[in-house]
Structure formats: C-alpha cells, structure tokens
Amino acid sequence: MINVTKTFLPDQEQYLEYVRGIWERGYLTNNGPLLQELESQLKSYLGVDHLYFCSNGTIVLQIAIKALELEGEIITTPFSYCATSNAILWENCLPVFVDIDANTFNIDPAKIEASITDKTTAILATHVYGNPCDVEAIEQIAQKHQLRVIYDAAHAFGVSYKGRSLLSFGDISTCSFHATKVFHTIEGGALISNHPELDKKLHLLRAFGHQGDEVYLYAGINGKNSEFHAAMGLCNLPQVRSIIEARAQIFDWYHEGLDWEHMSRPQLMDDVEYNYAYYPVVLPSEEKLKGVMKALAAQEIIPRRYFYPSLNTLSFMPQRFDCPISEDISLRVMCLPLYVGLPQEDVKRICNIINDYLSA
Ligand SMILES: *Cc1c(COP(=O)(O)O)cnc(C)c1O
C-alpha cells in the first residue's frame, strides 16, 4: 500500500540514547533540557529569535489568539485544515472567510479589505502547502487597519521567502510538528513570535500562566511538550535538509511524469526556497477526481483530498460566507503520495494510472 505520506523515522539507536538520558535524569517534561536544546537548535535552523516548542499545531493557534488578546472577527482562509478555523471558534471569535487566489490557493489580499468591519481584529492566514502567502500585501492591509497577523505555518517548516525565514513575517507564526509534516516530533508544534515583549507571556501561556508557585499572571493552558517528543525532534532535525532534498527529487519525478494537459497545480510564489511539503494536483472536475482516486485505490495507492471541504461550508460555522474559488478547487484537488523513500518506479506508476484515466 502506498499512502499519501509515511512518517520519517530516525535511527532507533540514536533515539534510545536520548531515552537513556531521560531515564538517568528522571526528568520527563516541564521545560526539560532536551526541550531547551531543541528550541535552541530550531531557532538557529529556522533563523528566528523567539520560538516556543508546544504540544501540537492547534493549541499554538489558540495560544497565539489568546496572547494577542483577539476578539470579534478574524479574517481567515477557507482553504486550510479545519484546525485553523476551529482555533478561532474555540477562542470565541468569528471566522470571516475571504476567498483564495486561484493561482496560489492562498488567501487573496485583494479581497480582504471588503471584509473588514469595525469588529475585525486580525488576519489568520495559512501558507498553503508551504507556499508563502502574499505577506507584503497582507502586511500593508494590516498596518492600514491596525490588525494583527497570525500565520498558520503548519506546512511552512524551513521555507524562506526573499532570503528570509517565512516564519519571521506577521506578529506570530505557528508550526505543526505532527508525524505527517516535513519535520516532526511525533506530536508537536511551535509558536514563533516577532515581538520580544510577548516572550514572557507566550512562555507562561504555554504552561498554565503562572511563574513558580506564587505568581499567577495569565489564564494559561497546558500546551507543554515532553522530553520524549523533544528527543524525536533532536533526532530528526539534523536529517531535515536531506529529507527536503529527497522530497524535491520526488517532486521533479511527478512534474515530469504527469500529463499537464489534463490537470494543473498551484503556482509557487517567486523568490521562494521551498520545502516540498505536498504534491497537490487539480483535476478538471470532482467526478474525474473520484475516478482517478478509484483507479489509484485499485492499485492500493491512497492520495488524500486535502483540503476538502472548503471550511466556509462546514455546518457548524456561525455565519455563511461565499468563497466560490475555494469551494471549486477543494472539490477537485488531491495530494499525491510524497515521502522519503518513495521509489521512482512507484511515482511513474502513479503518474501512468492518472494519465491513462484522464486521457481515456
Ligand atoms: C497539521 C495542521 C494543523 C494542526 O496541527 P496539529 O499538530 O495536528 O495540531 C493546523 N493547520 C494546518 C494548516 C495543518 O496542516
């Protein structure tokens, strides 16, 4: 079976070496030495100054909203994973969906201003598939209307834009280090802030909001992560460059193998050092998409409908917003298998099944 993704596992002995250290110290969680080492290595790898390793990529969105004291309406993208808009709902704010750009699949800055009201406090945008949002245009709008900007950078590990870490744009960026992402710590996530004055707050919000046993400052939550998760990160981080290279190779194979007369893909922004996080293709119709998926499933190849459905259409959203481009693309897009160790002959086979189905 070929799944859409397969978790990268580091050398087992190396992981066990870290585990033996944890046994010796008897210190399993709560800002331990491995966690601090991972944070320090991540800052240097990613080129950012303020980073907090947390328990997952969803709680960090909630902590970001809390730290910036957002309320009211948050402008966001309908073309993302449900964690993005669910975090807004969990923080008692209203997700206001703005449609995406038909080429990049990221929130369309040209459509943002029409959705701003006197209740709008922020923009929460996703760098979809690791492709940077139009961060400059978003920055301009945010400044003009005094809005905060959070980027859901769950897909954007290691991506740089114009020579600068993509995570350094906006007020706060959040990452996911879930087992399915380019870099993982089994479960995990990070807050990256560009405001030194938020440091203490983010640090405390992640761990119940108190300092020692006497000073209770914020209504914090438990967003901590453990030494075991940090150890997985310390094993995987030195591999991440070669992981990204291996993914780039597979990317090329798909690029060469697929028949672009019958499908398309999102357009990468210029000036990007990319991480090859996903390989989405857009088919001519949902019917064709389902047909292709069936043909692949017959050979035990399982792509993923990602992102589907368009988040603005979810039944539990408090208010309706029309996002025709996102609704259309989400019906026709799927991500193809992409992971370290996927052999070239399998990529060729996948391409042939898709090409044959679409040209029949
Ligand atoms: C994976 C993902 C998340 C959630 O991350 P978890 O670590 O699984 O909580 C949030 N947003 C996007 C865009 C994601 O892809």
Image: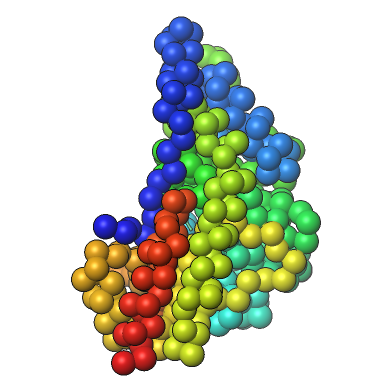
Q: Is residue 107 above or below residue 126?
A: below
**As drawn, 323 above or below 244:** below
Quarter occupied by residue 240: top right
Q: Position of residue 265 (x, y in %)?
A: 52, 77
Whether residue 44 is visible to the viewer of this picture, yes or no, is yes
Asked whether 162 or 167 is in front, the reply is 162
Q: How is the image coloured?
A: rainbow
Residue at 24 percent of width and 75 percent of height? 294
> How far across and how far down the image is residue 42, in percent?
64, 37
User: Hey, which quadrant is residue 350 in on the image?
Assistant: bottom left
Q: Could you tell whether 337 is left or right of 171 in the image?
A: left
Is residue 52 found left or right of 88 in the rendered image? right
As drawn, which residue projects farthest toward the front? 345
Q: Residue at x 42, y 56 (%)?
A: 342
Which residue reaches farthest bottom? 360
In this view, the residue in front, 78 or 318, is: 78
Horizontal side of residue 296 vs 210, given as left or right: left
- Quadrant where the N terminus lies? bottom left
Please determine whether, in this image, residue 36 is positioned above or below residue 285. Answer: above
- The reply to whether residue 27 is visible in this rendering is no
The image position of residue 75, as x and y in percent, is 56, 67
**Spot occupied by residue 229 in the image (x, y as percentages of width and height):** 45, 30
Residue found at the far top of this picture: 24
| The C terminus - image quarter | bottom left
Q: Residue at x 48, y 19 (%)?
A: 18
* 18 sits to left or right of 69: left
- Residue in the image at 69% along x and 59% along y: 273
From this view, report whether residue 34 is shown above or below residue 168: above
Disc count in the image? 0
The one nearer the camera, 49 or 306, is 306
- Comparing 257 with 138, the one in front is 257
